[in-house]
Amino acid sequence: MSRAPALLELEEAWRACRADPEFVRDLRRCLATHAGRPTPLTRADRLAGRVGGGLRIYLKREDLTPTGTHKINNGLGQALLARHMGKTRLVAGTRTGQHGVAVASAAALLRLRSVIYMGEEDARRRPAIVSRMRLMGADVVPVPLGSRPREEADLEARRDWTLNLRDTYYLPGFLLAEPPYPSLVRDFQSVIGHEARSQIFEAEGTMPDTVVAWVGGDGSAIGLFQAFLDDRGVRMFGVGAPVTGPSTGLDDAAGPLLSRLRDTGRVLSARVGDEEALAAVRLLAETEGIQAAPESAHALAFVARQGPPGAIGQTILIGLPGRSDREALPVASEAARLTGEQCR
């Protein structure tokens, strides 16, 4: 079997599993008992007080999953799909290691073998992450990398998959993979948005004015936005880091699904600089005692720059895709330095 038929096989398998009550029950059980779902929705009143009087800010807490990020949702979903397809082995590429941890965790739960490709320099800098993956039974393979670490680690995983199509499932965690993977990532991450929509309606009795998420290629934003697409009164902002050269906001790095929402105007785009994001890390930690991942901080900083209610609404839902234990010390140190300089 070549790669193209393998992708058709995957698409057909997902279509069948999506309509299979047994698969749906298994997935819900795994998400509840292994991923700790539903994750909480936290009302951040102290943060809101610092940002602007009268705001009501809610945080969707993917940082409280057992693996510390939203990535476990996709990891469990695709691993369960792989098992239903009769695959016994998972391969994945990872850069920071968080996707690798999610794949290793899902593989251990479902009694599958896992092989995680990771840049050798990334692996050297993050020994604790590598140890976590190996503790869960994963074979972590260092990859010599050039200028595009994530792509090159992922390329090695794809090569492995191509050579072992009969028993191996390639499990990407981002929206830039070839179809049908972007739809799979969206579908498995949509649990974030469906939970958040139900939770905020229970808390407020209505939908939020605004939903804000960091946009990258890993599906956290599309997962949050998905449940609110038909709520026309809800504004949605995708926030990214600055880019060099001309930019129209969300770009191809966010994946085709988010780009389509941008092009139709359903999701508005914004950019936040690194210094502003680091200040938001410190602000959330000081006011709510929550350690945000740098990705989360861009969405937080965008809300913080709005000031009092009116600019983007009064009730705001922010996605927190995860915590960032691996970068806690350097992030905290840099945030403290920048805050000190701003106060001089």
Image (spheres, helix red, strand yellow):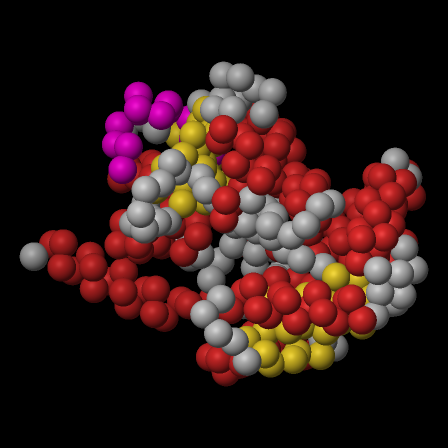
Residue 336: horizontal and vertical position, in percent?
Answer: 24, 62
Residue at the location (58% across, 26% down)? 228
Asked whether residue 310 is drawn in magenta, I would say: yes
Horizontal arrangement in the rendering, residue 98 relative to residue 329 (left or right) = right
Asked if residue 27 can be seen in this view, the reply is: yes
Tell me residue 57's x, y (percent): 41, 34
User: Where's the N terminus, which quadrant?
Assistant: bottom right
Vertical placement of residue 66 versus 73, above or below: below
x%, y% of residue 100?
63, 67
Residue at the location (34% across, 54% down)? 281
Residue in front for this viewpoint, 120 or 326: 120
What kind of secondary structure does the magenta stretch mostly adopt? loop
341 in the magenta segment: no
| Magenta segment | 305-317
Identify the image quadrant of the C terminus. Answer: bottom left
* Residue furthest left in the image: 344
Compare residues 27 and 40 and report the one nearer the observer.
27
Percent of width and height locating residue 296? 44, 49
Quarter assignment of residue 117: bottom right
Residue drawn at (59%, 74%) of the image: 118
Residue that protrudes farthest toward the top in the picture? 233
- Whether residue 110 is visible to the viewer of this picture, yes or no, is no
Q: Residue at x 65, y 52 (%)?
A: 177
